Image (cartoon, rainbow, N blue to C red):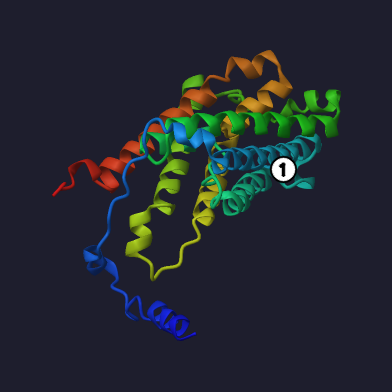
Amino acid sequence: MEGKEEDVKLGANKFPERQPIGTSAQDRDYKEPPPAPLFEPGELSSWSFYRAGIAEFIATFLFLYISVLTVMGVVRSPTKCGTVGIQGIAWAFGGMIFALVYCTAGISGGHINPAVTFGLLLARKLSLTRALFYMVMQCLGAICGAGVVKGFQGDARFTTQGGGANVVAHGYTKGSGLGAEIVGTFVLVYTVFSATDAKRSARDSHVPLLAPLPIGFAVFLVHLATIPITGTGINPARSLGAAIIYNKDHAWDDHWIFWVGPFIGAALAAVYHVIVIRAIPFKSRS
């Protein structure tokens, strides 16, 4: 019993009551975590590896189910005033990302997006083995989610309402659509890096931060801006799932934009975070 009381006292007094803030916090000891290995065969024999993949599958399934069903409801109504409208669609996407990242962050990291996984891979936050597994599970979850929506809506209604598929809107060029996807994904992945930065958490521990909140809000804002242009992809799994279930030529004509754009945006965000924000390549190794 005495030993337990001593442990409690040590825990209570482990950190000073007053925490350094602002630039004074820069001096706090912080060790940069080592980069994830490119290949980690040991993961393949770990249950946590497959548990994380299942979590990504379920999260992306739920994400497509709620978001595409919301889109279907807006498209179905003859007057947008009788529906949640574009703002509601944006809230559905952003709100689901907030909820799902909150639920799965402790299991898989809560990526729910191959572009996010790709950006974190480039920053060496996870292995190539895990990244590829996540992407496959995300795409499968997206296909199943969109498939369930089609099952509820029926073939004819689902097809006439566009299936929630991402296409470049009339009046915009493919270049405009590609640019919107690049910038939109950059905003999202940059927010992910900033909200999950371990050094920031150590430096600003006096400031409570719920990482899923800024991530979900970034998704909401990007949708508000780019729904009129591309329907807002910024998530290749979301675009793939809807395109496969909808399966019309005009959706496949633009589909490459919703892979190339997000991957370029994610790569730019990773480079910007690592080189400019964190300046990791330029730090002293001593």
Q: Nearer the viewer, residue 169 or 181?
A: 181
Residue at the image position 72 percent from the left and 39 percent from the top: 65
| Callout 1 amino acid | Ile
Res 181 seen here: no
Give the answer, above or below, for where 58 lies relative to 241. Answer: below
Q: Nearer the viewer, residue 52 or 259?
A: 52
Residue 253 drawn at (x, y percent): 60, 14
Residue 58 drawn at (x, y percent): 67, 41
Residue 160 drawn at (x, y percent): 79, 24
Residue 153 drawn at (x, y percent): 84, 32
Residue at the image position 31 percent from the left and 40 percent from the top: 272
Examine the image and state in which quarter residue 203 appears.
bottom left
Q: Nearer the viewer, residue 199 or 10?
A: 10
Res 218 seen here: yes
Residue at the image position 26 percent from the left and 41 percent from the top: 275
Examine the image and state in which quarter residue 89 appears.
top right
Classify mark 1: helix, strand or loop.
helix
Give the answer, above or below, for where 199 lies relative to 11. Answer: above
The reply, left or right, for residue 12 in relation to residue 57 is: left
Give the answer, above or below, for where 81 lies relative to 114. Answer: below
Count neighbours of disc 1 (C-alpha within 10 A) and say few if under 14, some if 14 to 19, many if 20 or more: some
Residue on which the image places disc 1:
66
The reply, left or right, for residue 156 in relation to residue 50 is: right
